[in-house]
């Protein structure tokens, strides 16, 4: 049994356009598209993988470009910022490169003694390049990225969480009486307008 989490294997998200997504990760960030396959549940949708030369675990960002998908909104319970590690001293290069490619929401800062360049991807995902030690990793460079500026792989991922004092502890009796838990069909607010149709499609469950 694995007892310790040693790092991130990959991070997966959703995109609108396959070509825009591919161009951003290969031409802007200089990663390599290491796999082009499909969503096994919806095979008309690509599953694109971008990482270092061989797709080393800890370097791979994957996307499902769904085409007509509406633009998402950031919220609690999901990755807010995916961080890539880059060589120390390389942020000025990346800042200039990103500006030249009109990357959105560029901002330089520092945290825990490390320089950071945060930005948004073409679908609004939050990213950061963080100046870090190599830790035995070799920076991957392509798409004219300088040899001393390439991405090592992931630095980490920051999750967005609700304030426990504001939201309260999650529990099953927050939206129905304890004596009648599991009896009524509970739906997200956005589906309430379709309750009759949904209930008609669902098979009845015995008490």
Image (cartoon, rainbow, N blue to C red):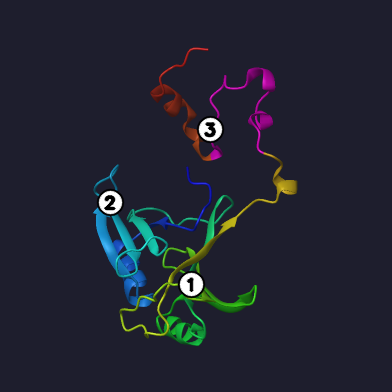
Residue located at (43% from left, 28% from top): 198
Side of 108 relative to 18 (left or right): right
State the residue position of label 3. 187
Q: Nearer the viewer, residue 164 or 150?
A: 150
Along the line of sight, the residue nearer the viewer: 17 or 22: 22
**Residue 181 part of the magenta segment:** yes
Q: Residue 102: horizontal and vertical position, in percent?
A: 43, 79
Q: Which residue is mark 2?
A: 45
Relative to 16, residue 105 above or below: below
Q: Position of residue 122 (x, y in %)?
A: 41, 67
- C-beta proximity under 8 Å, tags 1 and 3: no
Q: Main secondary structure of the magenta part?
A: loop
In three-dimensional space, the C-alpha distance between marks 3 and 2, rounded to whole angstroms, equals 28 Å
> Which residue is located at x 67 percent, y 18 percent?
179
Locate residue 197, reporting x and y percent: 42, 27
The residues bearing labels 1 and 3 have C-alpha atoms spaced at a distance of 47 Å
Q: Is residue 71 magenta?
A: no
Q: How many marks?
A: 3
Q: Could you tell which of marks 1 and 3 lies nearer the N-terminus?
A: 1
Per the rendering, the mark at residue 135 is 1
- Determine crowd level at label 3: few under 14, some 14-19, many 20+ residues with C-alpha closer than 10 A: few
Q: Of the residues under marks 3 and 2, which one precedes in the sequence?
A: 2
Left/right of residue 157 with respect to residue 67 in the rendered view: right
Instruction: Classify mark 3: helix, strand or loop.
Output: loop
Relative side of 150 to 37, left or right: right
Q: Which mark is residue 92?
A: none
In this view, the mark in front (1 or 2)? 1
* Residue interval drawn in magenta: 170-189
């Amino acid at each position: 049994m694995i007892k310790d989490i040693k790092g991130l294997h990959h991070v997966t998200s959703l995109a609108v356009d396959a070509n825009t997504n591919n161009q951003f990760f290969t031409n802007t960030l200089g990663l390599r598209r290491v796999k082009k396959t499909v969503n096994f549940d919806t095979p008309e949708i690509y599953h694109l993988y971008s990482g270092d030369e061989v797709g080393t675990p800890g370097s791979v960002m994957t996307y499902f470009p769904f085409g007509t998908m509406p633009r998402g909104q950031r919220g609690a319970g999901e990755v807010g910022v995916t961080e890539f590690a880059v060589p120390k001293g390389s942020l000025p290069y990346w800042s200039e490169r990103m500006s030249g490619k009109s990357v959105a929401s560029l901002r330089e800062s520092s945290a825990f003694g490390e320089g950071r360049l945060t930005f948004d991807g073409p679908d609004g995902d939050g990213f950061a390049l963080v100046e870090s030690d190599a830790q035995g990793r070799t920076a991957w460079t392509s798409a004219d990225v300088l040899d001393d500026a390439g991405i090592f792989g992931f630095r980490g991922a920051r999750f967005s969480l609700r304030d426990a004092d504001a939201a309260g502890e999650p529990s099953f009796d927050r939206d129905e009486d304890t004596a009648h838990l599991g009896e009524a069909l509970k739906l997200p607010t956005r589906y309430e307008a379709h309750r009759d149709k949904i209930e008609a499609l669902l098979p009845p469950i015995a008490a």
